[in-house]
Image: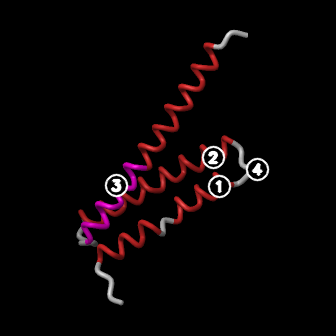
């Protein structure tokens, strides 16, 4: 079966190893909250680095795969949005705990 570049990138999107690693880490029973946060931040940093690397390759003329670069940018944006939402939930939980009377 012959795959076009868009199908190849979509297959790469669904076979994203950092995302599977983070999901496996979340499903472990003995993982601490700090480990989950660290894994989330590492995944976000990895997707951001991949996005910057693919954009740099396009600018230097080493790649002409525009759809792959756009997918990398979307993955980086979604990872950042997920990290921000996790941060917002943590801050909300902290303020709620601080409002409790002892």
Whole-number angstrom distance, CA of label 4 to CA of label 3 = 32 Å
Residue identified by numbered label 1? 25
Q: Are marks 1 and 2 in contact (CB under 8 Å)?
A: yes
Within 10 Å of disc 2 (Cα), the crowding (few <14, some 14-19, many 20+) is some
Label for residue 36?
2
Q: Quadrant of the C terminus?
A: top right
The mark nearer the N terminus, 4 or 2, is 4
* Disc 4 target residue: 30
> Of label 1 and label 2, which has the lower sequence position?
1
Sequence-first disc among 1 and 4: 1
Circle 1: element type: helix
Residue extent of the magenta highlight: 65-78
50 horizontally vs 35: left or right: left
The residue located at (71%, 44%) in the rendering is 32
Give the x, y percent position of residue 17.
53, 65
Badge 3 is on which residue? 74
Q: Position of residue 40 (x, y in %)?
A: 55, 48
Residue furthest out toward the top: 101
- The quadrant of the image that shows the N terminus is bottom left
CB atoms at circles 1 and 3 under 8 Å apart? no
Distance from label 4 to label 2 (Cα)?
A: 11 Å
Tell me residue 87's x, y (percent).
Answer: 51, 34
């Amino acid at each position: 079966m012959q795959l076009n570049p868009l199908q190849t990138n979509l297959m790469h999107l669904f076979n994203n190893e950092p995302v599977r690693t983070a999901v496996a880490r979340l499903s472990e029973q003995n993982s601490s909250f700090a480990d989950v946060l660290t894994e989330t931040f590492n995944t976000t940093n990895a997707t951001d680095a991949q996005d910057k690397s693919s954009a740099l390759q396009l600018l230097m003329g080493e790649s002409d795969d525009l759809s792959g670069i756009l997918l990398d940018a979307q993955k980086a944006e979604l990872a950042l949005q997920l990290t921000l939402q996790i941060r917002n939930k943590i801050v909300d939980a902290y303020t709620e705990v601080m409002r409790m009377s002892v």
